[in-house]
Image: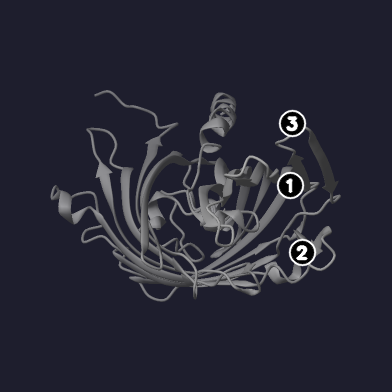
Amino acid sequence: MKKFLLSSILLGFGTLSMVAQSGTKSPYSQYGLGVLSDQSQGFNRGMSGLFQGFRNGSQVNMQNPASYSAVDSLSMIFDVGVAGQFTNFKEGGAKVNAKTANFEYATALFRVFPKFGVSIGVIPFSNVGYSYSTQQNVGTSTTTTTMGFSGEGGLHQAYIGLGYEFFKGFSLGVNASYLWGSYERNIVVSSSDSYVNTLSKVYGAEVSNYKLDFGAQYQQQLSKKDVLTIGATFGLGHKIGADPYLLVSNLDTQTGTLTATGDTISNGLSIPMTIGAGIAYSHNRSLTVGVDYLLQRWGSESFPVVNELTNKYQLSSDYYMNRHKFTVGADWIPSPLPTTRNLFKRIHYRVGASYATPYYKINGQDGPKEMTVSAGFGIPLTNAWNNRSVLNVSFQWVNQSAKNLITENSFRVTVGLTFNERWFAKWKVD
């Protein structure tokens, strides 16, 4: 057990740099803390991230830590995932395509005592990554002004979670996370006229703080073949100890003189309180269907912006708005028993859909809403002594759109590998 705990910790910290590579090319990542990760994994991404009532000891459901108590004494589970994405951006008559690929997550789950499971892992929280420019003529002259926008970075979290079944059917859990990362957003205004100064603005912040999330699940046996699971989660909202800054520089192209000013807001970033609930129904261990709801109370938080009236860098309480997300999904395996040799009857077939409202405003109007449709497969990896490891493949179509703003259509493929090996089993030789 000590060796496993040590290797698990090394796994988590060894993947920090890889997860930090998670990215996006969405112009919408220039707002707020960036594009929020749905934090789903290989097994539930094909169900659009359904998780509240999902309770299965063979998968790591880190989004509801109460599920950890379902792991059995012989399971040592490692789950890693990568994703690739193709996105089409459309605004007016203009279209642009982009491709991204990144390491998504690394998690582990094991049992230390009866009804007591422990999980560790590294997952993304948000992503910032974009680069584009606009150009226009100055009056009727041939002089052009170019505005360049670019940004990179994001936030990530490494967590350790505990889940315990207090009495039959009822479990509680908690994830304690270290939240870290940074972002930098740049705006550069230049001109084709060498007599016009070049102006640049840099917005940035570095984050290093904690994050706490709690979960609960209650499972009720309705009949010999039917099980109902109710799940709920709560995330603590608080300041995250970052001092966002704004640096403004002006280059005099005639003399080469650079003047710079800066402003910083102490402890100016925060994460919201989150509340979620869901229900899942399972029949004969073959079919599972569920529905989730998640509320992120961003509307109660503030974000640093430049006040257009006073031209001061200050916190705005009118920047964020509450985010609501609804998810439905299903998982079907024709034959849940490992006795059949028909591979197609042992594959998990998954479908799902979700709808999410924006969490920020753009120039006073609501940001982009998000609609997702997903499908996926869980393919068992079988050998002579193990039939519990699974290759999870999911496909997602994601649409982000808002009135008079950019429309994004993304096709995302995620591949997750769940190593579910039997440990502590005593081998018997005849």
Q: Nearer the viewer, mark 3 or mark 1?
A: 3
Point out which mark residue 256 bears: 3
Which residue has dot 2 on it? 302
In this rendering, position of residue 246 left or right of residue 338: right
Q: Considering only order in the chain, which callout, 1 or 2, is on the residue closer to the N terminus?
A: 1
Q: Which residue is mark 1?
A: 210
Image height of 113 relative to 335, above or below: above
Q: Please say which color scheme the image uses.
A: one colour
Kindly check if marks 3 and 2 are in contact, taking CB atoms under 8 A apart as contact: no
The Cα atoms of the two marked residues, 3 and 2, are separated by 38 Å
The quarter of the picture where the N terminus appears is top right
Q: Give residue 369's position: percent from left, percent from top.
A: 50, 71
Chain-order first, disc 3 or disc 1? 1
**Around disc 2, counting alpha carbons within 10 Å, would you say few (fewer than 14), some (14 to 19), or many (20 or more)?**
many
Q: Secondary structure at mark 3?
A: loop
Decide if residue 235 is on the left or right side of residue 356: right
Cβ atoms at labels 3 and 1 below 8 Å apart: no
Quarter holding residue 199: top right
| Res 113 seen here | no
